[in-house]
Image (cartoon, rainbow, N blue to C red):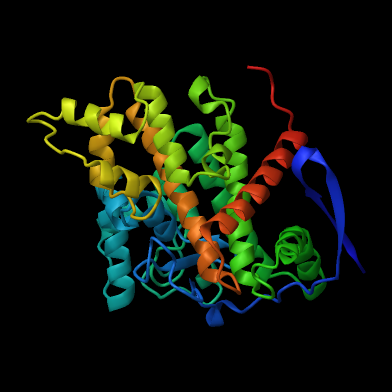
Amino acid sequence: MTIQLEKRERGNKVTTTDLPNVDLPQPQSASAFDFTLHPLRPLPSFGRRQTVGLSTAVSFDPNTVIMAATGHSLNHVVERMDYGSYLTMRAWVRSVTSGSTMQRGTRESLANLMPLPEDINRPPTAEELLTLPNTMTGYWRLAFRMFRRGAGPTWRGLLVRLAWRDRQLHVLEGMDPEEQAAMRAKLFSGSIHYWASSGLFNGSFRPMLVLDATLQHLAWADVQLSRSQHSVLRTDPIVGLVQPGKAPMRHWFDRILGLTGTQNLAGLCDLLAERADKANPRTFTHLELKQWATAQKLMPPGPAHQLLAACCPEVDFHRERTQLWAARWLTFLICYVQGFSTDPVTKTVAQAAINERLTSLRDEFLTAAPMKAA
């Protein structure tokens, strides 16, 4: 059977491309599943130290997402947000790995976070490993329970989507072969045929599935954020950060320039120097800002927070920090395409592929659920 793929080109012209039938990837048993993706080459900007961990066959794990977006580890974020839950989770991991019996108070605290197995001290089974790797970093359902109280509606919705996908893949393992094949076709056919047409990944199923599932979540978030009461977020809040011509970080810096009324990075550098004081003595060089804006170097979380603080009150600290995380995450996805593509590609090519797919998915969400007038 041949599948026709619609491709949007300049001028909104739509063409169809016939694609040969592509066999869908077969599920792997959880016990044999590798929860780390291994790039063909180091990810630009992020390098060899950036691991690409998975929660399921089509989901990055929370630690990978948080580290790439914020520069902090999952442990650091959990410790800062909910220290009690952080200590509880560490106690559980310690009891499972050492075989020791967990204290009653820790059991009760853990019961408030997630439903407990009959024997809390036993290691997870092979089936449970599909959504709960030994490292405890790949469990979006747990992340939803821990972070939902402090998240806004859009980010809480993202956690719901990720947790649901973890559950969905877990249920898939228990289906009979015919049901499983039908579900896999429903979940993955569109993603595989789209990226097969790009020629970037050839037969490497897992990298393309993880990428496409992530772009689906980002497209959904773009639609939700565009309904925000804040006018600055209404126009392509996520898709706008990956428009061709400029790196996502440069698009973010352009937002800061517009909000602060500065003309260019040199002007922003002067503004930051004027606002440096004893409480915030950090000074920024023009070269630093250029390197961060072009993603030659990753902007560390400390200087990022100091820059945003110095740009207040013109800049909403929390809103623009979230946009910064989105820009960093999109930078990671561009580098991900470069690291996993069959043949080496430039950032320009990788970004164009991300933008085209993200825009297409966003349009699908808008068509499925038309946006109400603001």
Please identify the quadrant where the N terminus is shown: bottom right
Residue at x-position 37% and y-position 67% = 47
Can residue 99 be seen in the rendering of this structure? no
Is 182 positioned to the left or the right of 309 in the image?
right
Residue 66 at what x, y percent from top left? 39, 53
Can residue 282 be seen in the rendering of this structure? yes
User: Looking at the image, which is closer to me, 122 or 260?
Assistant: 260
- Picture layout, residue 48 above or below residue 155: below
- Picture layout, residue 210 above or below residue 305: below
Is 53 positioned to the left or the right of 202 in the image?
left
- Name, please, the residue furthest toward the left: 278
Residue 334 at what x, y percent from top left? 52, 57
Please identify the quadrant where the C terminus is shown: top right
Residue 119 at what x, y percent from top left? 41, 70
Residue at x-position 50% and y-position 69% = 339
Residue at x-position 25% and y-position 34% = 269
- Name, please, the residue furthest toward the right: 1
- Name, please, the residue furthest toward the bottom: 32
User: How many numbered callouts?
Assistant: 0
- Name, please, the residue furthest toward the top: 374
User: Looking at the image, which is closer to me, 49 or 45?
Assistant: 45
Residue at x-position 24% and y-position 43% = 303
Image-quadrant location for residue 260: top left
Is 203 positioned to the left or the right of 165 in the image?
right
Residue 81 at what x, y percent from top left? 30, 44
Is 148 positioned to the left or the right of 225 in the image?
left
User: Looking at the image, which is closer to me, 25 or 237?
Assistant: 237
- Picture layout, residue 155 above or below residue 42: above
- Picture layout, residue 303 above or below residue 4: above
